[in-house]
Amino acid sequence: AQSVTQLGSHVSVSEGALVLLRCNYSSSVPPYLFWYVQYPNQGLQLLLKYTTGATLVKGINGFEAEFKKSETSFHLTKPSAHMSDAAEYFCAVSVDTGGFKTIFGAGTRLFVKA
Amino acid sequence: NAGVTQTPKFRVLKTGQSMTLLCAQDMNHEYMYWYRQDPGMGLRLIHYSVGEGTTAKGEVPDGYNVSRLKKQNFLLGLESAAPSQTSVYFCASSYRGRPSNQPQHFGDGTRLSIL
């Protein structure tokens, strides 16, 4: 079975600082990995996804994530935080096992200080 | 292009009442999903559908029923609401194909309180 662990339910950074949101996954088969962002009173929006190929994935709004198989990680980064990045971020994993399940992490709320 | 639309956006029910949440998508997606979101628990899959006329149970199906009579609509029903069903409900849809690597498109949610 797959699982996702997001380290830190809350992360606070200053505007202009590096954003690092951590995600570790567990899967017995090659995973597909996603990061979604949720702004207040809205649904989740796709930031980026890893399926196969290049392990460094670039997404929208300047975010990127690197798939590290040896560390079973898919951490999300952004070099310089903006106030508009304040939101909740969800890491998710799914696999091609004939099932139909995408497992979402518990979420990390990002606060950006002026 | 509206994407995924959920109605209503808010609702307060009394214990034992019934209601139906409606999800509509205009992207011609084959797959549709209902999730509930609770603090600190991420999203949990309630039911899903791989096409018109088909539905299946997800992780937390008890107390809910669904129907997919039309490809663009996916209804979630609560027959006898309980306080434990107080939550934010999200509908999502995705393209056909290898489902596991397709991103899901979400509605803005329905905030449901059961008193």
Image: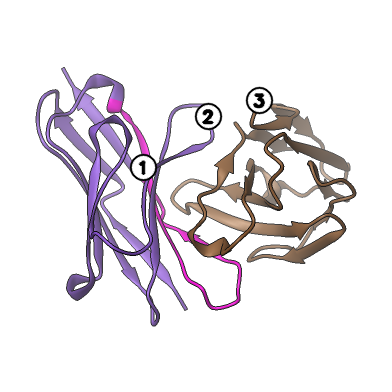
Residue A46 numbered mark, or none: none
- Disc number lying in front (1 or 3): 3
Q: Chain of mark 2?
A: A
In primary-sequence order, the first of circles 2 and 1 is 2
Are discs 1 and 3 located on one and the same chain? no
- Which amino acid is tagged 1? Tyr
Vertically, is A78 above or below B41? above
Toward the viewer: A34 or B98?
B98
Indicate yes or no whether the magenta region holds residue A92.
yes
Residue A42 numbered mark, or none: 2
Q: Quadrant of residue B24?
A: top right
| Chain for colour purple | A
Instruction: Please tell me whether mark 1 sits on a helix, a strand or a loop.
Output: strand
* Residue at x 47% of width, y 79% of height: A1
Residue B16 in picture, x, y percent from top left: 87, 46
Residue at which label 3 appears: B2
Q: Quadrant of residue A15?
A: top left
Q: Chain of mark 1?
A: A
Q: Is residue A89 left or right of residue A15?
A: right
Q: Quadrant of the C terminus of chain B?
A: top right
Residue B89 in picture, x, y percent from top left: 65, 42
Separation (CA) of disc 3 from disc 2: 14 Å
Q: In the image as oriented, which residue stretches furthest toward the left? A: A17
Residue at which label 1 appears: A89
Instruction: Please tell me whether mark 2 sits on a helix, a strand or a loop.
Output: loop
The magenta segment: A85-107
* Residue at x 60% of width, y 31% of height: B108
